[in-house]
Amino acid sequence: MFPFFENSAAWDDFGEVINPDDYVIKEENMEEASMQVGGDLNGKFDEGSASLMLDTTPSKVVSTELTVQVKCSLVYMDFEGRADSRSIKSIIAHVAPLKLVLVHGSAEATEHLKQQCLKHVCPHVYAPQIGETIDVTSDLCAYKVQLSEKLMSNVLFRKLGDYEIAWVDAEVGRTESEMRSLLPLSAPARPHKSVLVGDIKMADFKQFLAGKGIQAEFSGGALRCGEYVTLRKVGDPSQKGGGTGSQQIVIEGPLSEEYYKIREYLYSQFYLL
């Protein structure tokens, strides 16, 4: 459970730092041990106690290895699997499910989480009672298609991190082997709006502008660039309905050389399709 504080030991060049007092035998304990074996306060033993210690029968420890057949399934987990309300809401928002089923927990907590998910995550949230059966079957269909060589020869890919992305205009057809395939359009493709792919952090863009000699600072939740241009993010990052959410960057300011220069720098941070 959180919060959790780990008590870490101090270390130096020779190992763990210890407290010498923890390893000192107190005089009272030594006197008690001497009295139990028949010694006096000066730590001297009498003949009977000495002979008793010498006549002690030797002993040894015998260990045996056995193979045990476990007739059950074992699952090892390196965490407890519990989270507080804030963490659960954050995890669900990042997963962005199309449908959500809530089980376990009190009725009050489950209803509260259900209403939060209906408002911010997705419109299909279920909280069945014990023994209640619900149907969460989805009517979405997935098809496997091939990319024809004619189509791929005209596709222009752009590098995006470890991936390559491209805009494709195609139509679904069938090959000679009756396999569904994406084929080039039989008619000229309609022009599409430019798509900017990527994500930008205002703090990183501020440093980028500083490297270009443009002074920028945050003011009122927006990034003020130069004297007249302001950048701000608008929109909800957690879109309702299972989407990943969408945000827009709005450029405000008079049309000037500075405005177009900052806009060009902003576009350079994205991939244009």
Image (cartoon, rainbow, N blue to C red):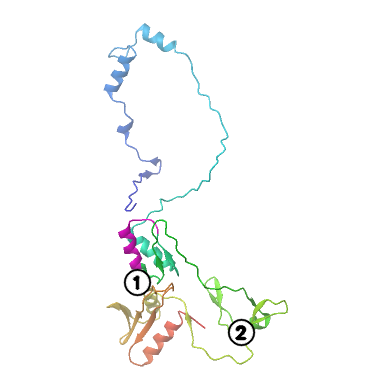
Q: Main secondary structure of the magenta part?
A: helix
Please, what secondary structure does the residue beneath circle 1 have?
Answer: helix
Residue 216 appears at what percent x and percent y?
Answer: 33, 79
User: Who is closer to the viewer here, 41 or 32?
Assistant: 32
Residue 211 appears at what percent x and percent y?
Answer: 40, 78
Mark 1, other Cα within 10 Å: few <14 / some 14–19 / many ≥20: few
Query: Residue reaching furthest right?
Result: 176
Give the quarter of the image for residue 242. bottom left
Q: Earlier in the sequence, mark 1 or mark 2?
A: 1
Q: Which residue is mark 2?
A: 171
| Extent of the magenta region | 103-116
Position of 23 relative to 152 (above/below): above
Amino acid residing under circle 1: Lys
Q: Residue at 36% across / 61% down in the picture?
A: 87
Amino acid residing under circle 2: Glu
Q: Residue at 34% across / 57% down in the picture?
A: 84
Q: Which residue is mark 1?
A: 119
Cβ–Cβ under 8 Å for marks 1 and 2 = no
